[in-house]
Image: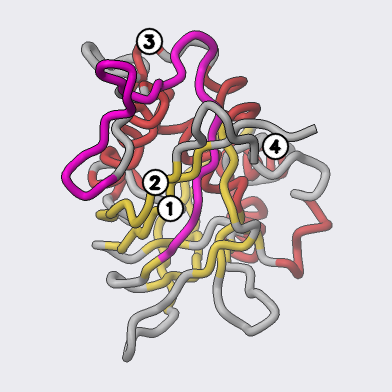
Amino acid sequence: MSFKMNVVTVEATLLEEMLGMSPDPNIYGEFIAKNAPDSKKMKEEMEALTKDLSPEEAAKIILDKGTTVFPRDEDGIPIMWDFQMKGNFKDVCGMLYRAEGTLSSKFTAYKKKIDGLIFVKPRKIRLLVPDGGKIGECQRPLRAQTARGEITALANSETVPAGTKLVFDIEYMDLKGKAPKIVKKGGKTVKDEDGNIVWTKSEMLETIKEWLNYGAYRGLGQWRNSGKGIYEYKIIEVNMCDENHWN
C-alpha cells in the first residue's frame, strides 16, 4: 500500500556553531543505551547516574562521560540522525504551542502527529562543513542536583562551525479535512505565470515553515539556550502530490 506524501526539500545553514547531540560511542552502552534516543535529556541522565554518589565522585563521572559527538557516515562526514531533526520539531512545536497566534498553538496532540505524519530523510543528514572550517570542541558547565548536594562539572561536545550546511527532505501527510486542493476556475486548472499548478494553502506546510522559521531563535543541537545551533534556511523544492497521484 502507498500513501499520498508531500515533500519539502530544505537547505539549512548554521549561523552559529552547533554542538553534537549523540553520546560518545565508547560510553553509549554503559548508561545511555538502556533509554530511547530522545527519552531523557543529558542532565536527567547524569542525575540518575550520580544520585548515590558524593559531589566529588559525581563530578568526575560527568567530566569523564558528559561528552556528546557527531556520528560519522561511511565517508567520515559528520551527520545528525533523522530522529534528531524530528525531535527538534517536537521541541519547537511544544514551545510555539504555548504562543498566542501561532499555527502550532492549534496543533493539538502534536507529538503523535509529528511521529506519525511527518518523516525526515535521509536517515543520515550530512553536516557539510564549509571550506576551511574545522570540527572543534565546546566545554561548558553542567550542573546537576544529587541526593548529596549540587555538583558542577564540565561537559564537552564536538562542534561544527557556522556556515555548515545540511540538506534534508520533510515528507508529510496532510491533516484530515485540511488537504490542499488544486485551484480551478471555470472547470479548468489554474496555473501561475511559470506554468505551475496553483494549490490552495496547505496548513501543514505552513506549520512546518513556522517550525523552521523558529530556528533563528531556537537552534539545533546541545546547549541551544545559549544561542548555539541557530540557523537560516531556504526551501529548495516543494512537491505536492496531486489528487490523482499516489507515491
Name the residue beneath numbered marker 3: 106
Kindly report the distance in space between the C-alpha atoms of the residues bearing marks 4 and 3.
35 Å
Say which element carries label 1. strand
Say which label, 4 or 3, has the lower sequence index.
Answer: 4
* Mark whose residue sits in front, 4 or 3: 3
Q: Nearer the viewer, mark 2 or mark 4?
A: 2
> In this view, which residue lies farthest toward the left?
193
Marks 1 and 4 in Cβ contact (< 8 Å): no
Question: In the figure, 8 relative to 207: above or below?
Answer: below
The quadrant of the rendering that contains the N terminus is: top right
| Above or below, comparing residue 169 to residue 154 in the picture | above
Say if mark 2 contacts mark 4, CB within 8 Å: no
In the displayed structure, 171 sits above or below 109; it is: below
Residue 93 position within the rendered picture, expressed as x and y whole percent measured from the top left: 41, 26
Is 188 part of what is drawn in magenta? Answer: yes
Magenta residues (range): 166-195
Badge 4: how crowded within 10 Å, few (<14), some, or many (20+)? some
**Residue depicted at x 44% and y 45%:** 239
Q: Earlier in the sequence, mark 3 or mark 1?
A: 1
Residue type for callout 4 = Ala
Question: Residue 238, which numbered label?
Answer: 2
Q: Helix, strand or loop at disc 2? A: strand
Q: Which mark is residue 229?
A: none
User: CB atoms at circles 1 and 2 under 8 Å apart?
Assistant: yes
| CA separation in Å, label 1 and label 4 | 39 Å
Q: Nearer the viewer, residue 174 or 213?
A: 174
Residue at 67 percent of width and 66 percent of height? 24
Given residues 147 and 176, the one toward you in this image is: 176
- Label 1 sits on residue: 9
Mark 4 element type: helix
Quickly name the residue at label 4.
48
Q: Amino acid at mark 2?
A: Val
